[in-house]
Image: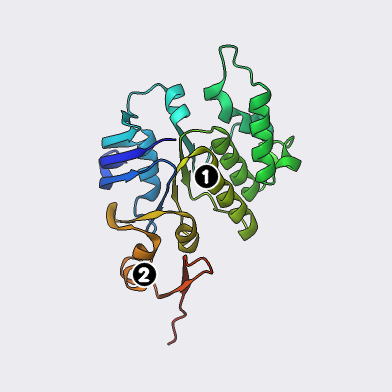
Amino acid sequence: MSTLELDELSAGYRRRTVVSGVSTRVDSGSWLGIIGPNGSGKSTLLKAMLGLVRHEGRVLVDGRAVTGLRHRDRARMIGYAPQIPQLPVGLTVTDYVLLGRTPHLGPLGREGSADLDVIGQVLERLDLSDLAGRALSTLSGGERQRTVLARAIAQRAGVLLLDEPTTGLDVGHAQALLDLVDELRAELGTTVVSTLHDLTLAGQYADRLVLLENGRVAAEGSPADVLTAPLLAERYAARVSILHAPDGSPVVAPVRGRG
């Protein structure tokens, strides 16, 4: 169970600043969804939380600054699934997902039965069991995406960062993935931060949303507060209607324009 805090976090590439002055707190076991138009800085913000890009400000996990931590210690605290991963050559699905257990291995660096149990459960839940022995190079785009997410989930870190986790997935696999992440929150107290293009999924799974525009926070609050037709029309230049699912969560429905 971990709390994540961002304190005036700014980040960018070389001399270009992409994200400016983001401050927020994600309580232990909660889910923060980061939304915003293309190019608003969502992926850069996640990378800054891990120290993967130039940044200023502070990122704290349970009050500890992430900057300066050893890679192994950071990997125990924060798991990350990038939107466009670089997959190693020659590994099977199982080999790759087992890499998620590396921060938890003992001095001999060998996985035990508990690690293998975690891997088996994650592969099953993400519909990857039949692909366990397949080489990564033979997977489809959606299969690769699920495999990358399986590695991050198997890491069992206190904070889980997911960059567009449903990209390339059909609706069934997208729901299975997000349901599994939601169960991790309930069972292990995992704190989740995810970027999502699908505003309806963001509103259904996240407790709170941060809407970025041009690298700055344009709105923050509950899904009901952020996913409003006027606000989305202003920030996305979109025509939408807000409906509601049976559980009361907002459904963002595009409205066709008529000449």
Q: Nearer the viewer, residue 17 or 203?
A: 203
Question: Residue 171 — which label?
Answer: none
Which residue lies under the disc numbered 2? 228
Quarter of the picture containing the C terminus is bottom left
Crowdedness near tag 2: few (<14), some (14–19) or many (≥20) residues, C-alpha within 10 Å:
some
Query: Mark 1 or 2, which is nearer the eye?
Result: 1
* Amino acid type at image mark 1: Ala
Q: At 25% from the left edge and 47% from the top edge, which residue is drawn?
A: 20
Residue on which the image places disc 1? 186
Whether tag 1 and tag 2 are in contact, CB under 8 A, the answer is no
Determine whether the residue tagged by mark 2 lies in a helix, strand or loop: loop
Residue 67 at x, y percent in the picture: 32, 28
Q: Earlier in the sequence, mark 1 or mark 2?
A: 1
Residue 187 pos. (x, y %)? 55, 41
Residue 248 location, x and y as percent? Answer: 48, 67
Q: Is residue 36 visible?
A: yes
Q: Is residue 249 above or below residue 119?
A: below
Q: Nearer the viewer, residue 162 or 13?
A: 162
Is residue 239 shown left or right of residue 93?
left
**How many labels sit on residues?**
2
Q: Is residue 14 left or right of residue 101?
A: left
Would you say residue 91 is visible in this rendering? no
Tell whether 8 sits left or right of 250.
left
In the image, residue 170 above or below residue 250: above
Query: Residue at point 39% right, 34% down?
Result: 50
| Quadrant location of the N terminus in the rendered image | top left
